[in-house]
Amino acid sequence: MDVLWSPWRYEYIKSGDETANQTKSERCVFCELSNSENGSDEDKFILHRARFNFVVLNIYPYISGHLLIIPFAHLADLDALPQETSNEMMDLAKHSQKFLRDVYRPHGFNLGMNLGKAAGAGVADHVHLHFMPRWFGDANFTTTIGETRVIPEVLSTTYQKLKPHFGTLSEK
């Protein structure tokens, strides 16, 4: 088995498992991220705040343009989301597809959720939707042979490319 060491991810992993005497929002990386008192949206790569959800760049992307659509409500399951929240989430997914298509010209998209630790959720107690542009051949030599992903763009560049598009949506 090949092992890829990524100690820089430890702070991210640790942030989801703090001490038991903290409140849910203090333990949850997404709740902390959505808190407008914890730095600017640009510093946190938040592209848009809607009424029930926000759109943010994944800071550990699988590919350039990897977005997350996250409800403000701290809920673990899709079926626990109020309909207004899940409806807005899907509307934001539709806008995300348009904006990613306009900016990156991908050949397709991956859209998905991992619900629960057994399903691969890195943050299992706060439901979120992954949205990624895809291109033919984006599983390149390095990914296929070296089993390593190469992300060709820094997050700040991705943010600057997408932010004007999300700015056309009404703010929260």
Image (tube, grey):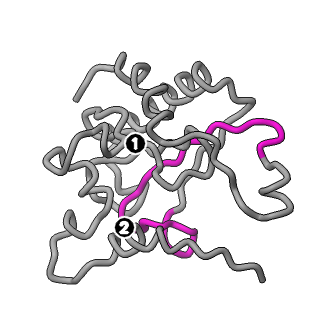
Magenta extent: 115-138
- Where is mark 1, residue-wise? 56
Residue 67 in the image: above or below residue 144: above
Tell me residue 159's x, y (percent). 44, 34
Q: Quadrant of residue 57?
A: top left
Is 49 left, or right, of 96 in this rendering?
A: left
Residue 166 in the image: above or below residue 46: above
Quarter of the image where the N terminus is located: bottom right
**Which of the marked residues, 2 or 1, is nearer the chain's N terminus?**
1
Tell me residue 72's x, y (percent). 27, 48
Quarter of the image where the C terminus is located: top left
Q: Which mark is residue 125?
A: 2
Q: Quadrant of residue 78?
A: bottom left
Residue appearing at x 64%, y 42% in the figure: 152
Residue appearing at x 55%, y 51% in the figure: 61
Q: Quadrant of residue 40?
A: top left
Residue appearing at x 72%, y 61% in the figure: 148
Tell me residue 138's x, y (percent). 77, 43
Task: Judge by depth and name the residue closer to the eye, 154 or 21.
Answer: 154
Task: Judge by depth and name the residue closer to the eye, 79 or 162.
Answer: 162
- SS state under label 2: loop
Q: Looking at the image, do the residues carrying marks 2 and 1 touch, with CB atoms under 8 Å apart? A: no
Going by the numbered disc 1, the residue's amino acid type is: Val
Marks 2/1: CA distance?
18 Å
Q: Which mark is residue 100?
A: none
Nearer to us of marks 2 and 1 is 1
